[in-house]
Image: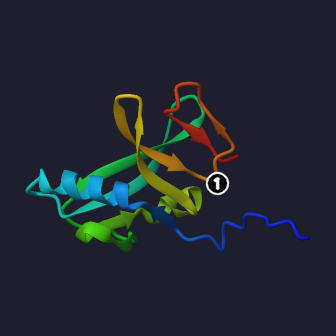
Amino acid sequence: MSVEQFNPEQAALVEVTPAAAKHFSQQLAADANAQAVRLSVKESGCTGFMYVLDLVAESSAGDREISLPEGVTLYIAEASESVIRGTKIDYVTEGVNRQLSFLNPNAKDYCGCGESFNVG
């Protein structure tokens, strides 16, 4: 029997579920100026980082482009790659609310309200 360990260098950059891709497609359809979704992280909150999703007309320098179902283009900010590598993005129902969910194998700690995370 062997133990499998997470190796961030071998992980896919991100995985997006069909539900999340459909959500992104609906958001893009509602914004005539947007052509894609851009994912990045920024320093924020009490724990360290928070996810930033923007509807954009074009990529920024260094962005990685990923084609998703539903005809959606996802750009990943180059500076954020090491923090989000291996993250699974889903669109989930919790009670009466629907929201995006980020399952990040790099995250070691989350703040109490769930707005920020730490990879250290």
Does residue 59 appear in the picture of this structure?
A: no
Does residue 1 appear in the picture of this structure?
A: yes
Q: Nearer the viewer, residue 37 or 42?
A: 37
Seen at 24% across and 54% down, the residue is 55
Q: In the image, residue 12 lies at what x, y percent?
A: 56, 71
Q: Nearer the viewer, residue 7 or 94?
A: 94
The image shows residue 99, relative to residue 106, as above or below, that is above
- How many residues crowd around disc 1 within 10 Å: few (fewer than 14), some, or many (20 or more)? some
Q: What residue sits right under mark 1 in the picture?
A: 105
Instruction: Name, please, the residue furthest toward the right.
Output: 1
The image shows residue 96, relative to residue 27, as above or below, that is above
Instruction: Name, please, the residue furthest toward the left.
Output: 32
Corner quadrant of residue 64: bottom left
Q: Give the side of residue 49 with respect to residue 37, left or right.
A: right
Instruction: Name, please, the residue furthest toward the top.
Output: 112
Seen at 29% across and 51% down, the residue is 54
